[in-house]
Image: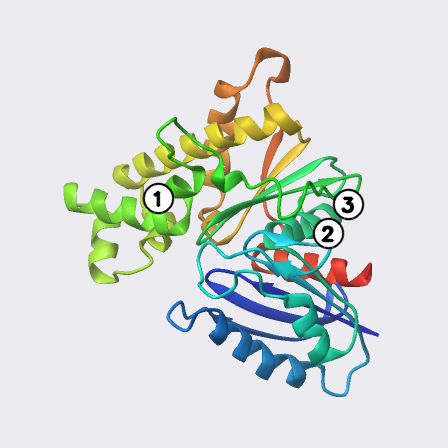
């Protein structure tokens, strides 16, 4: 008896086939080509999914999609990163391909579920997950179940405002935003490990932050602190509204690791009312890059 978990993100596509969340039978992964848009993503899934499930008894498919969805109908509302997804009936499209039940939810919701059941959120309730990738998303698990508001979507932490001018958490803290912040910073401070790494290997500049921090680069430390302050300020609104027991930092940018976790944990109490001090525990994702598809497999197991 097998289940399928699919991740459709703004940067990464992934399919896992598993008997249980941690007994993975097969997998396939690729990067999103923004130029080809949603059509390119669907073409890849249509080629890879039948190959992966051939000869296997698949019970259900779960999907974590990078954007707001109508989870009851499995219809995509839109993607904020990739064109061509607006109002697409993803559940029905996949069902016609695999002929088994299909459940579609937001990717951060799926990751939150995976972390709550099998990762850094185990033994905590409620669990809030923030994904720091090409975009910024959030998911809340209460009593072991995803919290759903009025469709489409909920807990969109990336779209929380940091000021009255419309600056959002996503516009300051996403991968694309951090790439731009680093590019600008190294032109102003051209010396040092971070600037050297960016000059030698440009593109996706945020990936150079962790090794520059390990070298003790003051510019990298300054950028990390500014980033963590923005994140902590955004997460303070989450705490005041939802008061989770734990906040899990996930997504590709969370691979910066302990320096990021520690900085967010240090700044978060500065924005919380006294009764909520010291605030939720802040932890790194335990499932890493598999958080979304493992959570999607849990969705499939309940289908």
Which tag is nearer the camera, tag 1 or tag 3?
3
Which residue is denoted by mark 3 in the rendering?
145
Residue at 44 percent of width and 69 percent of height: 37
Classify mark 2: helix, strand or loop.
helix
As drawn, the residue found furthest toward the front would be 87
Q: With respect to residue 33, does 238 lie above or below?
A: above
Which of disc 1 and disc 2 is earlier in sequence? 2
Q: Position of residue 93 (x, y in %)?
A: 66, 73
Which residue is denoted by mark 1 in the rendering?
213
Along the horizontal axis of the image, is 235 left or right of 15? left
Q: Which mark is residue 118?
A: 2
Residue 2 visible at all: yes
Which of disc 3 and disc 1 is earlier in sequence? 3
Along the horizontal axis of the image, is 98 left or right of 48? right
Q: Quadrant of residue 127?
A: top right
Q: With respect to residue 198, does 129 lie above or below?
A: above
Classify mark 3: helix, strand or loop.
strand
Q: Work out which quarter of the rendered image holds the N terminus and state it.
A: bottom right
Q: Position of residue 102 (x, y in %)?
A: 74, 67
How far apart are the alpha carbons under marks 1 and 3? 37 Å
- Graded by Cα atoms within 10 Å as few (under 14), some (14 to 19) or many (20 or more), the crowding at tag 3 reads some
- Graded by Cα atoms within 10 Å as few (under 14), some (14 to 19) or many (20 or more), the crowding at tag 2 reads some
Residue at 41 percent of width and 71 percent of height: 33
Q: Nearer the viewer, residue 111 or 262?
A: 111
């Amino acid at each position: 008896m097998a289940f399928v978990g699919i991740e459709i993100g703004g940067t990464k596509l992934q399919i896992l086939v598993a008997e249980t969340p941690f007994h993975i039978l097969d997998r396939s992964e690729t990067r999103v080509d923004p130029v080809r848009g949603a059509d390119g993503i669907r073409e890849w899934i249509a080629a890879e999914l039948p190959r992966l499930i051939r000869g296997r008894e698949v019970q259900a498919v779960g999907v974590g999609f990078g954007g707001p969805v109508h989870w009851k109908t499995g219809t995509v509302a839109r993607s904020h990163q990739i064109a061509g997804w607006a109002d697409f009936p993803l559940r029905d499209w996949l069902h016609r391909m695999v002929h088994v039940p299909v459940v579609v939810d937001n990717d951060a919701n799926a990751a939150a579920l995976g972390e709550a059941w099998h990762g850094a959120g185990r033994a905590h309730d409620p669990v809030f997950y923030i994904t720091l990738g090409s975009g910024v998303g959030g998911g809340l698990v209460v009593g072991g179940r995803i919290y759903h508001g009025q469709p489409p979507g909920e807990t969109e932490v990336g779209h929380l405002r940091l000021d009255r001018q419309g600056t959002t958490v996503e516009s300051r803290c996403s991968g694309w935003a951090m790439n731009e912040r680093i590019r600008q910073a190294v032109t102003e401070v051209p010396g040092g490990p971070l600037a050297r790494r960016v000059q030698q290997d440009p593109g996706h500049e945020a990936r150079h932050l962790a090794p520059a921090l390990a070298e003790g680069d003051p510019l990298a430390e300054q950028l990390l602190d500014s980033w963590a302050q923005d994140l902590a300020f955004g997460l303070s609104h989450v705490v005041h509204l939802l008061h989770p027991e734990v906040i899990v930092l996930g997504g590709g940018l969370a691979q910066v690791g302990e320096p990021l976790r520690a900085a967010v944990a240090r700044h978060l109490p500065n924005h919380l009312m006294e009764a909520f001090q010291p605030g939720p525990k802040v932890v790194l994702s335990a499932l890493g890059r598999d958080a979304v598809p493992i959570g999607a497999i849990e969705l499939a197991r309940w289908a």
